[in-house]
Image (cartoon, rainbow, N blue to C red):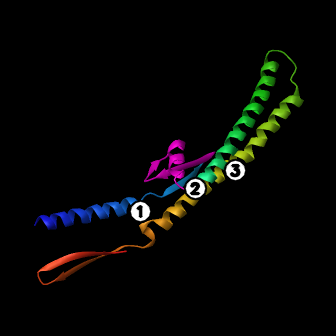
Amino acid sequence: MPDMQRFVFLFFLMCINLKFTHSQEIVYKPIFGGINFYQDDKQLSDTELKNILQTNDLSAHYLRRAEANKRIGRVLSSIGGFIIGYQLANYLYGSKLNWEIAAIGGGIVLLSVPLNVRYLSLKKMATITYNENRNESSFNQTKPKLHITSGGANFGFILNF
């Protein structure tokens, strides 16, 4: 009887393992101004997503490119915002508004928009690449099948991959 209990325990352990292998896909949902990433119905932070995507070389490459675009875009938008804010502050304190410099600040802010769009698309590409490579190496491609067999006084489970 202990052998049968051990077998049933190992069988259920394998079933749980297959379930977790299947549920590790990362999904993304677009929201206004960005994208939320989820794994097992849990929203991932940027750090968690980065740690997961670093396990795949190609997705890590896409993520590094995305983060470079994000950094450059944030620097440009900060500089442009500072220029616009400085001009508005001077105007509020009685100085004349210099429209040329404010327009330059606005142009710098507009330069950051395509970089942010590229950042989001590269981050999505990193996630898609991770999911594709994960699916190629997981049990999901082989679609395991469970058969219950019996013969005389014996019965058993056969798990085919």
Q: Which residue is at 26% across, 63% downward?
A: 12
Amino acid at dot 3: Arg
Badge 1 crowding class, 10 Å Cα cut-off, few under 14, some 14 to 19, many 20 or more, is some
Amino acid at dot 2: Asp
Q: Which residues are magenta?
A: 32-57
On the picture, is 128 further left or further right than 11? right
Distance from disc 2 to disc 3, alpha carbons, whole Å, reads 20 Å
Q: Is residue 32 visible?
A: no
On the picture, is 81 further left or further right than 46? right
Q: Which residue is at 22% across, 80% downward?
A: 149
Amino acid at dot 1: His
Which of discs 2 and 3 lies nearer the camera? The answer is: 2
The tag earlier along the polypeptide, 1 or 2, is 1
Q: Which residue is at 45% across, 71% downward?
A: 141
As displayed, is residue 125 above or below residue 106?
A: below
Dots 3 and 1: beta carbons under 8 Å? no
Q: Which residue is at 77% across, 33% downward?
A: 80
Distance from disc 1 to disc 2, alpha carbons, whole Å, reads 21 Å
The tag earlier along the polypeptide, 2 or 3, is 2
Numbered mark located on residue 152 in the image: none
Measured from the top left, where is residue 71 in percent x and y? Answer: 68, 39
Measured from the top left, where is residue 4 in percent x and y? Answer: 15, 68
SS at circle 2: helix
Distance from disc 3 to disc 1, alpha carbons, whole Å, reads 30 Å
On the picture, is 106 further left or further right than 146? right
Badge 2 crowding class, 10 Å Cα cut-off, few under 14, some 14 to 19, many 20 or more, is few
Measured from the top left, where is residue 50 in percent x and y? Answer: 54, 46
Numbered mark located on residue 118 in the image: 3
Label 1 belongs to which residue? 22
Label 2 belongs to which residue? 57
